[in-house]
Image: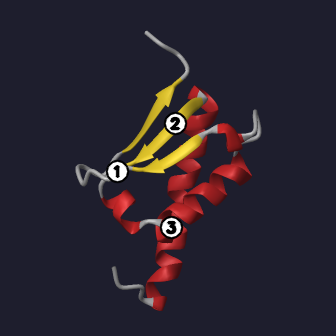
């Protein structure tokens, strides 16, 4: 992947917004694992770094460091998936 310096602020901002959404999901569901797939996964730390930083800043109900966040190696649809502690 080509790292263009002009794109970094765009991906940082997008990662912050996605991180805010993920933080809300984490606060509501308290998942033990979040898997980033598709386009999110392909961008790696360029996008996932700001997502993880925003999650760490925004989740205050419990320490988010216990939540595993991983990249999927399957290039499918761009989805962030979380597995919750709650079982059906």
Give the position of the N terminus as an image quadrant: bottom left
Answer left or right for 73 relative to 65.
Answer: left
Q: Which residue is mark 2?
A: 33
The crowding category of the residue bearing disc 1, from other C-alpha atoms within 10 Å (few below 14, some 14 to 19, many at least 20), is many
Quadrant position of residue 13: bottom right
Give the position of the C terminus as an image quadrant: top left
Answer above or below: position of 60 versus 45. Answer: above
For mark 1, give the secondary structure.
loop
- Looking at the image, do the residues carrying marks 2 and 1 touch, with CB atoms under 8 Å apart? no
- Looking at the image, do the residues carrying marks 3 and 2 touch, with CB atoms under 8 Å apart? no
| Image coordinates for residue 28, horizontal then vertical, percent | 59, 29
Q: How far apart, in angstroms, are the residues tagged by discs 3 and 2?
A: 17 Å
- Marking on residue 37: 1
Dot 3 or dot 2, earlier in sequence: 2
Q: Residue furthest bottom?
A: 5
- Marking on residue 71: none
Q: How far apart, in angstroms, are the residues tagged by discs 1 and 3?
A: 13 Å
For mark 2, give the secondary structure.
strand
Quick check: can you spot residue 83? yes
Between 6 and 35, the residue placed more toward the observer is 35
The crowding category of the residue bearing disc 3, from other C-alpha atoms within 10 Å (few below 14, some 14 to 19, many at least 20), is some
What is the basis of the colouring in this image? secondary structure
| Image coordinates for residue 83, horizontal then vertical, percent | 47, 29
For mark 3, give the secondary structure.
helix
Dot 1 or dot 3, earlier in sequence: 1
Answer above or below: position of 41 versus 61. Answer: below
Residue at horizontal 57 percent and vertical 42 percent from the top: 68
Q: Which residue is mark 3?
A: 45
């Amino acid at each position: 992947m080509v790292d263009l310096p002009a794109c970094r602020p765009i991906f940082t901002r997008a990662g912050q917004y996605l991180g805010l959404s993920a933080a809300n999901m984490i606060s509501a569901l308290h998942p033990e694992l979040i898997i980033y797939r598709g386009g999110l996964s392909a961008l790696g730390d360029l996008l996932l770094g700001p997502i993880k930083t925003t999650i760490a800043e925004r989740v205050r109900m419990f320490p988010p460091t216990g939540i595993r966040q991983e990249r999927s190696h399957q290039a499918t649809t761009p989805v962030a998936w979380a597995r919750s502690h709650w079982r059906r």
